[in-house]
């Protein structure tokens, strides 16, 4: 599959086969793709907490399903939690000078690498930003002072691929001027 086909195939999967575990070698390739993601000034301002224990995955999934959102998360056999870590001094100075918080961009890039790598492995994924942060931190031992930014669910999808609906190219792309 070429890259554009991979991007077209990748979707936010919200139904997983809870009885089918993700093979460790597939998960390791996904994590290597995340580890190799680029970041501002090579700061790598992340830590990936990988939840594979079935009982813990259900608990994390329930914490991600708070207020009725993300009910499917309890069936995901893997949760990759992305914790924001400190920037290096170069990235910190650049963030201050340019008034741009680079770790959020960097973590977004890493999340994209994770989801595309999962798709390449034949797995579904969904990036979650709505969850009980305090509850998940307690479940997996993330220090309370750290920011848990994303929970990426990974597993074998139970639903077929959908046709993507996107804005027309001319609405989102401009050449040489706005």
Image (spheres, helix red, strand yellow):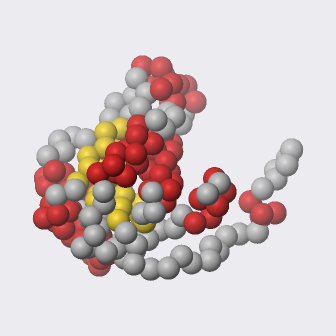
**41 above or below 162?**
above
Residue at (54% x, 64% y) in the render: 10
Tell me the residue at 13%/64% (across/down): 55
Residue 48 appears in the rendering = yes
In this picture, is 79 found above or below 92? below
Can residue 115 be seen here? The reply is no
How many numbered marks are there?
0
Location of residue 83 with respect to 43 vertically, above or below: below
Q: Residue 125 is drawn in which quadrant?
A: bottom left
Q: Residue furthest right?
A: 176
Residue 168 coordinates in the image, percent (x, y): 76, 69
Q: Quadrant of residue 79?
A: bottom left
Image side of residue 167 versus residue 106, left or right: right
Q: Residue at x 63, y 53 (%)?
A: 3
Snapshot quadrant of residue 14? bottom left
Residue 57 x/y as whole percent: 20, 62
Look at 62% across and 64% down and name the residue there.
Answer: 8
Residue 165 at x, y = what percent? 64, 74
In the image, residue 144 lies at what x, y percent? 18, 44
Q: In the image, 15: left or right of 58? A: right
Name the foreground residue: 133 vs 113: 113
Camera-side residue of 116 and 63: 116
Which residue appears farthest toward the top when viewing the image? 89
Relative vertical location of residue 163 with respect to residue 142 in this rendering, above or below: below
Quadrant including the N terminus: bottom right
């Amino acid at each position: 599959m070429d890259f554009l086909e991979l991007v077209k195939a990748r979707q936010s999967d919200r139904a997983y086969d809870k009885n089918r575990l993700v093979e460790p070698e597939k998960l390791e390739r996904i994590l290597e793709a995340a580890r190799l993601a680029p970041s501002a000034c090579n700061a790598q301002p992340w830590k990936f907490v990988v939840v594979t224990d079935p009982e813990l995955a259900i608990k994390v999934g329930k914490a991600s399903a708070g207020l009725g959102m993300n009910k499917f998360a309890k069936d995901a056999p893997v949760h990759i939690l992305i914790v924001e870590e400190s920037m290096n001094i170069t990235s910190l100075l650049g963030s201050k000078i340019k008034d741009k918080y680079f770790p959020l961009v960097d973590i977004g890039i890493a999340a994209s690498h994770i989801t595309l790598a999962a798709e390449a492995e034949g797995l579904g994924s969904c990036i979650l930003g709505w969850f009980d942060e305090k509850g998940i931190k307690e479940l997996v031992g993330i220090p309370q002072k750290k920011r848990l930014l994303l929970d990426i669910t990974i597993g074998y999808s139970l639903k077929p691929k959908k046709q993507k609906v996107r804005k027309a190219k001319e609405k989102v792309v401009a050449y040489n001027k706005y």
